[in-house]
Image: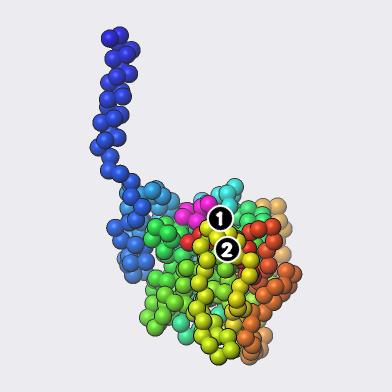
Amino acid sequence: MSPVALSNFVALALFASFAAAQPPQSTYPATPLASKGPFAYPTGIPYKVDTDLNLIRGTQVGYNICNSTTEGPNSLCQTSWLNGLDDFCLWAPVESGRPVGDIEGSMLAWCTKPGHGTRLIPAGAITGVQYTKTPDYVQVVGFIDQTKINMLDGDYGGEMDPHGADLRGNPMGGIVYSDKFTGQPIQGIEWHNFMGSNSFCFKVCDPAGANPKRFCEHIFDRIGCAYNAPNAARNNTFESCEGENQDFPGVYTSEGVVHTYTQPPESLGAISSMPYTARVPASSNCQTFESASIFTGLPTPTGATTSPAPTRTPTTGTQRTTGTTTAGANNTTATGAASTVVISGFAGLFGVVFSALFLS
């Protein structure tokens, strides 16, 4: 055998031996993401929540210990927050170039307020948002120029939640905190965040509530915010409200009879119609703020000019009774309630869904 042939033979033998020594890849982690923790803030948070190896989706992209040393445009923080109208985060890509549906497992926290060690949503990107605190959850629903947070123009998006098909969550290792349940930051185990169509909704459920898994359901990934987080959000309006609980996602009442919607499998094709319109919960004590003056300390988008921020002065609190249907559920204008009907065979974030884009 020639030296070259011998060398190739030895290399192949070593490779075969190495491959044989590797355990087969698995799908599921030893402990699902939603069963890890809760992690006390800040000392109980591990560097990475997802430490599983040899799983099909690979390893966690970012980290969970986030502070002033990690904050900025290169942050890989995967610890998110929802504290109020002026202080919340959204899950968005590391870099632009791929649709959300392909990269839900690697999304990062982008926040409206410095101090969380994350990337910051550029000034002016959010053009309207409604924050609501209810007895069992807190929620933000709004409008955003998604290209400012590395999402593709025209991307109809997807759903992030702490479950996913393999129970590792989307993003993998992503955790969420809020200080609105006890007055101190605590981890919200159950949450969901829909992103796409220049709109978003993000809900975090009180872990001490009676039904956090039901209010923050994760199985209706194909029917968007209008059904998972019914709302009265309006573009160009920034308001903070109190509200009543919504009906559990997928549960509705018709002619006095309570029904539970079953989402059809993707194999049956696009969802072309829905048997109901979700009830929008009544809100009260709404305070409206002037423009984006609630978002301070955010970076200016490249090429943009700055102007003095208006004073953050709320208007008088108001009571709003929304009725029984989702406001503007089929409104495609930018100034209506947070709902959009989507065409061209893709899934809409806020209206009737036409495809199976929102993968859990």
Where residue 201 sits, quadrant-wise, is: bottom right
Report the front residue among 162 and 299.
162
Q: How many marks?
A: 2
- The N terminus appears in which quarter of the rendering? top left
The residues tagged by marks 1 and 2 sit, at their Cα atoms, a distance apart of 8 Å
Q: Residue at x 69, y 57 (%)?
A: 344
Where residue 17 sits, quadrant-wise, is: top left
Q: Residue at x 30, y 23 (%)?
A: 11
Whether the residues at callouts 1 and 2 have beta carbons within 8 Å, the answer is yes
Residue 226's place in the image compared with 98, above or below, is below
Question: Label 2 is placed on what type of residue?
Answer: Met
Magenta stretch, main secondary structure class: helix
Q: Residue at x 55, y 65 (%)?
A: 222
Q: Which residue is mark 1?
A: 100
Q: Residues within 10 Å of mark 2 (few under 14, many from 20)?
A: many
In what element is the residue under mark 2? Answer: strand
Residue 235's place in the image compared with 300, above or below, is below
Q: Which residue is mark 2?
A: 195
Where residue 357 appears, as percent x and y from the top left, is 57, 59
Report the front residue among 52 and 48.
52
Q: Which residues are magenta?
A: 101-106
